[in-house]
Image (cartoon, rainbow, N blue to C red):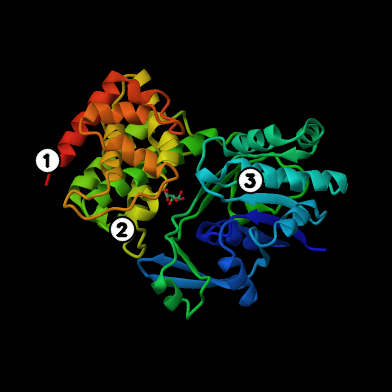
Amino acid sequence: MTRRVLHLGLGAFHRAHQAPYIQDAGGWEITAVSMRTPRLARQLAAQGHRYTLITRASDGPKLAPIDVITRTIALNADRASVVESIADPNTHAITLTVTEKGYGPDLAHLLCDGLSARQAAWAGPMTLLSCDNLPSNGDALRRLVTSAAPAPLAAWMDAACAFPSSMVDRITPAPSETTIVDAGGDLCAVETEPFRQWVIEDRFAGPVPDWASAGAILVRDVTPYEAMKLRMLNGAHSLIAYLGALRDHECVRDAMADPMIAAEVRTHMDAAAQTLPPVPKIDLRTYADDLIDRFANPAIAHRCLQIAMDGSQKLPQRIFAPARVALDRSQALDPFALAIAAWVIFTKGHSLSGAPLPLDDPLAPLLRTATAAKDAAERLDNLGRLEGLQDDGMLLEPAFRAAIMRAEARLMTKD
Ligand code: CS2
């Protein structure tokens, strides 16, 4: 019997990252679950579970077939099959890309039901590997699942399950018409950049794919790598997304061609780097240079609005956390304040030239009300009182507030 990974979250990122890694590792198959709409699960099944991965670089696109996903399930239509699949003795690992806002009660109950069935079936240990852009994502998942489990199940999880943290990286724009056309009409095709990275904590329960043979890095502690990626890559991404949207740029590459934004991004990355613990074997200057090149990749059309969504869920770990470190160490605060200022203006719904901007965020109505206030200080007070925005008290810090207000004023007057 083939060994299986069950993957939760059949989005473009999974198809461009974990699926190719597992295919390259060999010897395993994936059952992939679409968590929201059944469309993708059905479409992939209808085309025999094969899809095209397009890698875009300046020397032109490269197409590769991916056929490691051999079964799909739509959660909404068939939850029972997901539970059964978790209890299947041939399933040894669950990987997840459910986005920041996915770590809630629905996920906890799904995993508890599945793991409870697995325990009852004596189906063996299980590795649950989070691949979302959250700090200590494995611990976050473990806390979520064990706290929703009755005591005997929680005790079994402690003994039989591993929740390693992992840092994942590959810039993957939402597929577009061009993606489908370039893939010869493949409706499940995805496009991505050549770079890929996966740093995984070496702490598994039972067999897992030989990820290292596919180029993943196994480490004892993933925390420094996670902080580096969240603060330098994702933090800069959010800054680019909000500044870019405000200045009417469609894609990250367009924003990077705007000298004002390019300069702010470099300054931000240097400030973010200064908040990090030492990252083993990584030169942060080279890492920053490489990020700038990746963001500027002319072949990748990564829309600012894609990255701008769910700001309330992303900014805590990307911007507020490093800002707290910077404040405590009296290091540069302005680059973090600029990102928050750009986000605050963004939530009001118009670019600097007056073009409408959508606010796609689970807290959207609350954010809109909070930032509708006329007075800059009142806007920050309102945001600071929002339940669900984990700003770590930074919105109450006088130095940070002053820096945000200065940045807001500067953005509003700049052409
Ligand atoms: C982006 C990430 O959409 C976003 O918020 O910052 O998806 C980013 O592209 C990936 O983390 C890159 O690995």
- Mark 3 or mark 1: whose residue is earlier in sequence: 3
**Closer to us: mark 3 or mark 1?**
3
Query: What amino acid type should be assigned to the residue bearing mark 3?
Result: Leu
- Mark 1 or mark 2: whose residue is earlier in sequence: 2
Return the residue at label 3.
107
Return the residue at label 1.
413
Query: What amino acid type should be assigned to the residue bearing mark 2?
Result: Cys
Residue 190 spot, x, y in % from top left: 49, 66
Near mark 3 (Cα within 10 A), the count class, few <14, some 14-19 or many ≥20, is: some
The answer to whether residue 125 of the structure is visible from this angle is no
> In screen coordinates, is 351 left or right of 192?
left
> In screen coordinates, is 6 left or right of 250?
right
Q: Quadrant of residue 267?
A: top left
What whole-number distance in Å separates the C-alpha atoms at marks 3 and 1?
44 Å
Return the residue at label 2.
251
The answer to whether residue 384 of the structure is visible from this angle is yes
Residue 287 spot, x, y in % from top left: 40, 43
Near mark 2 (Cα within 10 A), the count class, few <14, some 14-19 or many ≥20, is: many
What whole-number distance in Å separates the C-alpha atoms at marks 1 and 2?
23 Å
- Asked if disc 2 is less than 8 Å from ligand 1, the answer is no
Q: Residue at x 51, y 44 (%)?
A: 101
* 228 vs 189: above or below: above
Q: Residue at x 83, y 63 (%)?
A: 1
- Mark 3 or mark 2: whose residue is earlier in sequence: 3
Residue 156 spot, x, y in % from top left: 81, 36
Q: Secondary structure at mark 2?
A: loop
Q: Secondary structure at mark 1?
A: helix
Q: Relative to the observer, which residue lies in front, 174 or 111?
A: 111
